[in-house]
Amino acid sequence: MRDSMWGFLLFAGVAWLAIGWSVLRLEPADVAPVAGPVVLFGALCEAVRALAGTRTWWLNAGMALLFGATAAVLLLNRDATYATPASLIGWFLLVRGAMDVAVSTMNRGIDRTWGMMLAVGVAQAALGFYAAGPLARRSDPVILVLGGLGVLRAVADLVTALRLREVSVRHEVLHLTPEREAGVSGYSAGLADYEGTPPPAKAKHRADTPGPKTFHEEVLRSTMDLDAKIAQAGVTGTGTAARLPEDLPPVPDTPAGVEPARSLTEE
């Protein structure tokens, strides 16, 4: 998914930049007919994100349908004023900004670019709030809002594309030592065997004693039993440091004290 999505997001970011630059060059009379295709392109981007098979595909699919309906209303609008295009563009920005804020907050522990995505989401929501208000009822504010929409979506898609490319190229985010890698492999294999084995049937006459509920608890119990058996066998040095005898003679610090210390040791 990452290998295929980062290229599309990179293309979408470049396309949003071109849209933002082109919209700022429009004449006031051409703003209303262009707003519909711009929102329709946003719906297409959400549909491709939904087809990628991520965990939030249903969210992207819902936004694709919502933005598609918004684009249809803009394309069928025959109003001579800028009130309808401004309000619907503001609606698009409010919804997309709120989604960016929610997703970036959810990924704050696993993605180091979450702060930038949060800022982009807040900027989109603020721009949408301005576009839906009474101050954006003329051609110039609508043109600036459309241009800002293209720039903000370009930043969001470019950052996401480069981040996905970085993760897909590195493959190994955490490098382990050979000993820890062998331990992780053994633990994973044991976990797979433990989850694939059905629980043993208990005899009816036996008391129902609580046992380990997870594989991790089973590993801890086995390790504690092994440590107890090693301690019963008298083997030291596994869990605690070996204790030295308290009646050892002092260490000689002169050549004259070497012979008495040696005789005490031999005895």
Image (cartoon, grey):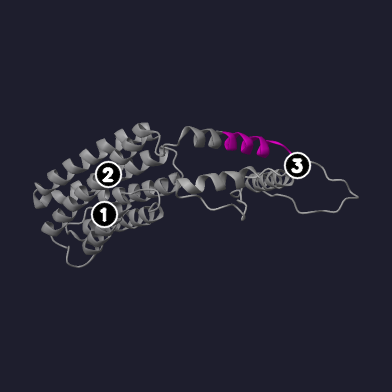
Badge 1 amino acid = Val
Measured in 3D between alpha carbons, the distance from the residue under mark 2 to the one under mark 3, in whole angstroms, is: 48 Å
Q: What residue does disc 1 label?
A: 120
Tell me where the magenta segment starts and ends, as one range: 186-198
Task: Identify which residue is drawn at 30% across, 58% down.
Answer: 94
Label 3 Cα crowd, 10 Å radius (few <14 / some 14-19 / many 20+): few
* Closer mark to the observer between disc 2 and disc 3: 3
Residue at the limit of the structure toward the front, as seen here = 256
Foreground label between 1 and 3: 3
The image quadrant that residue 198 belongs to is: top right
Q: Residue at x 51, y 34 (%)?
A: 179
Neighbours of disc 1 within 10 Å: few (<14), some (14-19), many (20+): many
- Tell me the quadrant of the picture where the N terminus can be found: top left
Say which element carries label 2.
helix
The C terminus - image quarter: top right
C-alpha separation, residue under disc 2 versus residue under disc 1: 11 Å
Give the spatial CA distance, label 1 vs label 3: 51 Å
x, y percent for residue 226: 69, 43
217 to the left or right of 20 = right
For badge 2, the amino acid type reads Val
The residue at 16%/46% (across/down) is 20
Q: Is residue 6 visible?
A: yes
Q: Which sits in the foreground, 40 or 10?
A: 10
Front residue (pair 20, 209):
209
Seen in the image, is 156 located left or right of residue 197?
left
Q: Name the residue under label 2.
A: 159
Determine which residue is flagged by label 3.
199
Name the spot of residue 63 as percent of width and height, x first: 38, 49
Picture residue at 26% right of the left edge, 57% below the top: 119
**Which amino acid lies under the numbered mark 3 shown in the image of this protein?**
Pro
